Image (spheres, helix red, strand yellow):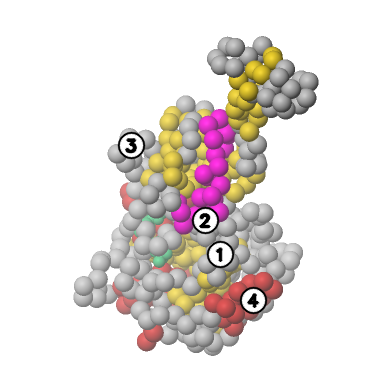
């Protein structure tokens, strides 16, 4: 290759609830790219999660970015054309299906160096982005866009995950087309055995409480399972729990499980995500179904709101029940549309208990003579010891009630983390700076790609 140009091609909104998936389309595109002689891989394919509070997402609000080197502007244009024509083939309407609004974004150069694109990415992680803002940003930053609403996620994702930013991996196995819609063949028992042997660099793949491999989705989409962690070699060992032959495998680098969206929330407008600090203002309420609502005052805004900790969030739900008025917390939240309470309701992804308040109760004193618990003689009339008869003219004493909750960081537990939520304790993240080979990210046999990136990073994008 003579002149090497870094090109990024990004996809979003390729899926629907009934058919297809953005990452699957990106995988098919990678298979095509890998066969072109004048295209070199520049990075892992990127699985970029955006604001989880967006109501029109299909599942996990994901866009995919592919970074390659091309040898000139013409090959760049033809790669981009190829991407758009594949999107056209993939999304051509199917009878009875909801309409998709696919979008792609293509650009030359290091997208993350554009302040405009970085700002768009940061906003798309935490807030609602309107299509016009994404379009104008794309135009000003020299990004070619095509399509509908998917352009928002596709453009925003371009500036994600520059070298140095924390990232994780997801190794995704896709299903043979003939099997889509049918039950997945997963051996949950061998997943349990494997899970107990694997190091903590793999996470959120298995729920030990339910004994289920949560890495496998339940819907009709083409994903057989997606295994998450920071060590691809260990992720590959999960292939032994799949009793269904995958169609192909892709290893993505991702902002998943890095708390990338955890900036300060600010005003709690619906559909935003971010972090708040708050004081618990009343005893948590356990709703029908086991969901917990915790009344809070957001600080320093002084605004009342409710933290919603759903039953599905397992361990976190049990922790939320132990909160008391006066406790101070930090919470990573997604703001829901206001309900009948007229208060902002915020779904909690992760909770930091900063301070637990002291709780007291009033009790009769102990007898100063024999140590027995005394009995009240009536309001304002003091106490008498039932054992030795000693009387004492005093009031009740304040006794501290032991709290069952300690300051700390609380998450829903393994297998139940939301896509962007970082596990606790945080893993040692991969920070890019390594260019993998096609064989390290893509496999069209039933064996997954298996090598780990080197621990220290070499030179990255040379464009
Ligand atoms: P899958 O995980 O299967 O790929 P998904 O959950 O990513 O599905 P999409 O169908 O891709 O869901 O829909 C997400 C839509 O929301 C896309 O059109 C994307 O452009 C748009 N979007 C993403 N982030 C934001 C945001 N912050 N503000 C507004 N729109 C957004």
CB atoms of marks 3 and 4 within 8 Å? no
The quarter of the image that holds ligand 1 is bottom left
For label 4, the residue is 194
In the image, what residue occupies the spot 39% across and 38% down?
Answer: 344
- Tag 3: Cα neighbours inside 10 Å, few (<14), some, or many (≥20)? few
CB atoms of marks 2 and 1 within 8 Å? yes
Establish if 353 lies above or below 153.
above
Of the residues under marks 3 and 4, which one precedes in the sequence? 4
Q: Is residue 80 visible?
A: no
Indicate the secondary structure of the residue bearing disc 2: helix
In the image, what residue occupies the spot 41% across and 77% down?
Answer: 222
Q: Is residue 62 visible?
A: yes
Residue 135 included in the magenta stretch of the image: no
Of the residues under marks 2 and 1, which one precedes in the sequence? 1
Q: Which of the numbered marks, if any, corresponds to residue 341? A: 3
Of the residues under marks 2 and 4, which one precedes in the sequence? 4
In this view, the residue in front, 7 or 314, is 314
Q: Nearer the viewer, mark 1 or mark 4?
A: 1
Which quadrant of the figure contains the N terminus?
A: bottom right
Separation (CA) of disc 2 from disc 3: 25 Å
Q: Which of the numbered marks, if any, corresponds to residue 209? A: 1
For label 2, the residue is 314
Q: Nearer the viewer, mark 1 or mark 3?
A: 1
In the image, what residue occupies the spot 44% across and 29% down?
Answer: 303
Indicate the secondary structure of the residue bearing disc 4: helix
Residue furthest out toward the left: 95
Q: Magenta residues?
A: 310-329
């Amino acid at each position: 290759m003579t002149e090497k140009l870094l090109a990024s091609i990004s996809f979003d909104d390729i899926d629907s609830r009934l058919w297809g998936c953005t990452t699957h389309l990106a995988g098919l595109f990678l298979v095509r790219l890998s066969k072109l002689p004048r295209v070199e891989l520049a990075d892992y394919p990127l699985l970029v999660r955006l604001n989880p509070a967006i109501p029109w997402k299909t599942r996990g609000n994901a866009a995919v970015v592919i970074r390659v080197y091309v040898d000139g502007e013409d090959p760049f244009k033809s790669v981009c054309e190829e991407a758009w024509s594949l999107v056209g083939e993939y999304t051509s309407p199917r009878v009875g299906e909801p309409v998709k609004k696919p979008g792609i974004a293509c650009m030359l150069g290091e997208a993350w160096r554009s302040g405009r694109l970085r700002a768009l990415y940061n906003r798309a992680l935490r807030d609602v982005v309107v299509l016009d803002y994404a379009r104008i940003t794309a135009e000003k930053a020299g990004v070619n866009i095509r399509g509908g609403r998917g352009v928002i996620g596709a453009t925003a994702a371009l500036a994600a995950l520059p070298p140095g930013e924390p990232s994780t991996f997801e190794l995704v196995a896709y299903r043979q087309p003939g099997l889509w819609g049918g039950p997945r063949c997963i051996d949950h028992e061998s997943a349990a055995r494997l899970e107990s042997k694997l190091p903590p660099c793999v996470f959120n793949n298995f729920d030990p409480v339910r004994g289920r491999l949560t890495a496998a989705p339940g819907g009709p989409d083409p994903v057989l399972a997606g295994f998450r962690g920071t060590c691809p070699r260990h992720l590959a060992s999960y292939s032994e729990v799949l009793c269904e032959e995958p169609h192909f495998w892709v290893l993505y680098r991702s902002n998943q499980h890095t708390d990338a969206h955890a900036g300060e929330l600010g005003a709690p407008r619906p559909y935003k995500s971010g972090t708040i600090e708050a004081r618990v203002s009343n005893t948590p309420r356990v709703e029908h179904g086991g969901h917990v609502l915790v009344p809070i005052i957001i600080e320093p805004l002084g605004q009342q709101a409710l933290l919603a900790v759903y039953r599905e969030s397992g361990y976190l739900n049990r922790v939320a029940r132990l909160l008391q008025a006066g406790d101070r917390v930090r919470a990573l939240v997604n703001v829901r549309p206001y309900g009948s309470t007229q208060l902002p309701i915020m779904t909690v992804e992760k909770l930091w208990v900063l301070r637990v308040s002291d709780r007291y109760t009033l009790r009769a004193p102990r007898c100063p003579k024999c140590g027995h618990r005394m009995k009240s003689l009536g309001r304002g009339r003091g106490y008498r010891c039932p054992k030795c008869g000693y009387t004492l003219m005093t009031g009740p004493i304040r006794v501290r009630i032991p709290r069952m909750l300690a300051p700390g960081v609380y998450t829903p537990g393994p297998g139940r983390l939301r896509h962007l939520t970082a596990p606790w304790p945080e893993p040692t993240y991969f920070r890019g700076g390594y260019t993998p080979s096609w064989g390290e990210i893509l496999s069209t046999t039933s064996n997954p790609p298996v090598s780990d990136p080197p621990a220290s990073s070499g030179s990255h994008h040379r464009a």
